[in-house]
Amino acid sequence: MVVADLHVHTTNSDGQLTLETIPEAATTAGVEVVAVTDHDRLHPDLDQPVVEREELTIIHGIELRVEAGNQRLDLLGYGVEQTDDLTALVDHLQENRIERAGQIVDCVEDRTGVELDIELSPGVGRPHIARAIADSDAPYDFGDSFAELIGDDKPCYVPRDIPTFEEGAAVLSEAAAIVGLAHPFRYDDPAAALDRARELDAVEIPYPYGHEVDVTPAEQVAAEAGLLVTGGTDAHEHTLGVAGLDREQYQAVAAQL
């Protein structure tokens, strides 16, 4: 039974949940612990690494994308405190996100001849733009927007600034109680990603990949390197508890927090 969902996004980045709606979603799913892990952004309303709200434990986390050789990885920081270095990094990344989103929107509007209804504010990302395209008069739904316009290597794609693995891991290690690798089997080279996980504190194993995945390599790396196991739904909508940790697994994480 999932009691801890340690990968949840809110409207602070590209999710649909808020701190006000998370408790009800958690109760519906039978979840007792949630980690808010917004993309490249701290949550402004979480002022402690761990808080209690309506009998729900909320862990302040972050999901940070980094460059690691020939692929990009996502790092999960848990029990985050605001250090000067982390604040400076996320501030820069958010400024870059807004600038990049503006360039993508300009390109989409030029190509489609429609005006998108979107606010370019901190946390903005391509999913926000895809939703705005789908809600416009342009002949694209959410998936088509990525496939035809804003996906990697598509005509309106614009790259964004991404820290190196070394920089991101160092900044998170100073600010967070636990730093782990997210969803290792989503990368082009899972073996290389898992090798980098050996330099961290944890690796995400329970995860809803949408297809059958042999997680044995991740379990072996966790055992060999003494890594904690994390897990979560990677929730961008309102459903929690699709994946996560049982009570015994979470106790190990809680001890580190």
Image (spheres, rainbow, N blue to C red):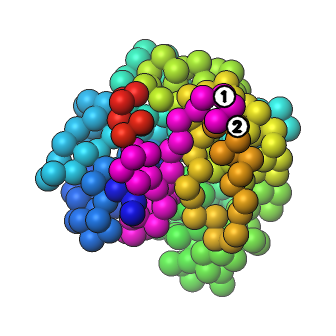
Confirm whether residue 118 shows in the render.
no
Q: Is residue 82 magenta?
A: no
Q: Is residue 92 above or below residue 140?
A: above
Q: Which residue is mark 1?
A: 225
Residue 47 seen from this side? yes
Q: Position of residue 84 (x, y in %)?
A: 43, 15
At horizontal 36% and vertical 30% (from top left) the residue drawn is 255
Q: Which of the 4 image quarters holds residue 192?
A: top right
Kindly identify which numbered label has been placed on residue 221.
Answer: 2
- For the point 39% across and 69% down, the residue is 239
Amino acid at dot 2: Val
Quadrant (top left/top right/bottom left/bottom right) for the C terminus: top left
Q: In this view of the protein, which residue sits in the foreground, 137 or 198?
A: 198
Magenta residues, start to end: 223-250
How many residues crowd mark 1 within 10 Å: few (<14), some (14–19), many (20+)? Answer: some
Q: Check whether the beta carbons of the residues at disc 2 and disc 1 lie within 8 A of each other.
A: yes
Magenta-span inclusion, residue 229: yes
In the rendered structure, the answer to whether residue 143 lies left or right of residue 94 reads: right
Marks 2 and 1, how far apart at CA: 6 Å
Amino acid of disc 1: Ala
